[in-house]
Structure formats: C-alpha cells, structure tokens
Image (cartoon, rainbow, N blue to C red):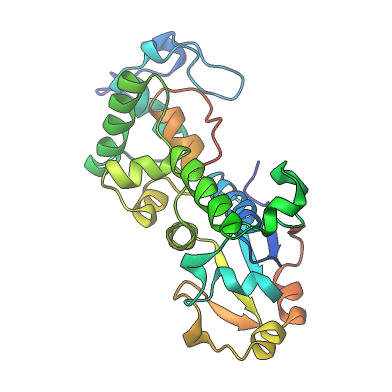
Amino acid sequence: MTAVTTAKTLSELHVKLDPEGFLVDPNEWTPEVAQLIAQEEGIELTDRHWEVINFVRAYYEEHGEPPTLRAITKRGGVPTKELYQLFPKGPAKKVARIAGLGKPRGCI
Amino acid sequence: MTEERKLAIIVSKGTLDMAYPGLVLANAARMLGIEVKLFFTFWGLDVINEKTVDHLKVAPVGNPAMHMPQLAGVLPGATDLATAMMKKQMEKLDLPPVREFLEMIHDAGAEIYACRMAADMMGLTKEDLVPQVDEIVGALEFLEMAEGAQIIFI
C-alpha cells in the first residue's frame, strides 16, 4: 500500500447504509460507490455489469422504483443466464445493492 | 447467509392458478441464490407438457376464491373468462406466461423434474415435455436429491 492509495473505503465516502448494506438514499449513489459495494460482494465490474447497473439506474430515475429482473433481461438486453453469471448467488439483492437501490420487495 | 438454503417445490396441480405459485417461489428463491428443484407430478405435468403448457386454465367451479356463485362457473365460457382475466392481471404484474416462466427459472439455475409414475400413467416421455425438463425421475430419486431442502407442496 505505497503508491496507489487512492481507493477509498465505503465508510470514507460517508454513504449511509441500512443494516443489510443497501443504500439508504439512492441519490447518494455514485459509480465509485458501486465499485466499492461490488468489491465487497466479490464482483469485479465489467462493461456488461455496467450495462445492467446503468439500465437499473435509468429505470429507477424514470419509474421511481427498481426494475424487476425480468425487465432487466427483457428491456435491458442481458439474458437471464448471463445475469446470473454476472451477479452470482442471488442477482436480485446484488444488483440492487450495487446500483444503490433499496432491498428488492417485488416477487419477480 | 442464504448460501446453504435449498428448496424443493412439488407441483401437483395443472391449473393456471396453481402453476404460478410454484414458479414464482422458484424464481424468487433463485433471485436470492437459493438452490431450487421443482418436481412436477400428477396434474402438475400439464404445466410442463408441450401440448398443454400454453393452454392452462383457471377453473371457476370448485374454486371458492373466485367469489362468484358456483352455478355461474358452469356457464359456457366461464372458464375462458376467468382464464383471460387472470392472464391480463399477470401481464400487468410483469409475470411471464408459463412457458417463458419455465425458461426463465431454468436459465436462472432451477432444476426441473417430472414424476416418473405420473408420466407413465399419462403415457408421456421426455419428448412430450418442454425442453427445460432436466429428467424424469421417481419419487425416491427426487427425495434423495432434495435431501436437506425445505419442501413445498402445491
């Protein structure tokens, strides 16, 4: 940890997280926050991850609620299989966390 | 936290309103990273049968949840009406049709099995079933596979 010490930790960014690690205020989200949460989840963000995240953020801005996973696959153009590969072991919560939205409440 | 959880869902009914609960639960479980195995038996085979998967219906007769006089349920067209109404509601909720739902949960990693006895009884082989069916297995095999899982019977 000598030269490259620019990376901050989540606590240093002062974003409020709920007890389960979801952002309390989606407006506090930045791409940097996404990077750090993804790191916590053990996910290295690729362009495909960003396509999902950007779609989810845009959908949220427009509708005021997060999209269903089906909406992500249907309208976001990332097939179900790939979505599960990008965000292994439970994409619903992981996508919501990384995109800075609350815990998903829907059924689908 | 949920890494070790396993769910085994037994679908024994073949009506539209009894097909969805199992599919919704299976999908929700996969979205949370819970391992899922579905076992379709008896009339549940209709849900994964190529011939019937797109034509499941809601039966108003004998279904007290329809909130209508039972006699009205036997009128011509009552079943189609109830079915059409339910499909419309499903679409509003962004619930896919059964065939697409099966594809979705299978792509999501849920395993889909058909009951051997029920398949034999109805003269069905794997070719008669939707391609998402992993295997036709007996009840013994399924119970072995479902060891340690929470079991839901629908």
Q: How many marks?
A: 0
Toward the viewer: A49 or A103? A103
Which residue lies at the image location 50% right of the left edge and 51% below the top edge? B84
Q: Quadrant of residue A82?
A: bottom left
| Residue A7 visible in this rendered orientation of the protein | no
Which residue lies at the image location 68% right of the left edge and 59% below the top edge? B74
Q: Is residue B62 left or right of residue B108?
A: right
Q: Position of residue B138 (x, y in %)?
A: 71, 83
Toward the viewer: B89 or B82? B82
Q: Position of residue A87 (x, y in %)?
A: 42, 45
Q: Is residue A5 left or right of residue A14?
A: left
**Is the residue A102 above or below the residue B91 in the image?**
above
| Residue A81 visible in this rendered orientation of the protein | yes
Which residue lies at the image location 28% right of the left edge and 18% below the top edge? A6
Residue found at the far left of this picture: A47
Q: Position of residue B153 (x, y in %)?
A: 76, 60
**Is the residue A62 above or below the residue B86 in the image?**
above
Which residue lies at the image location 32% right of the left edge and 25% below the top edge? A57
Q: Quadrant of the N terminus of chain A?
A: top left
Q: Is residue A91 left or right of residue B121?
A: left
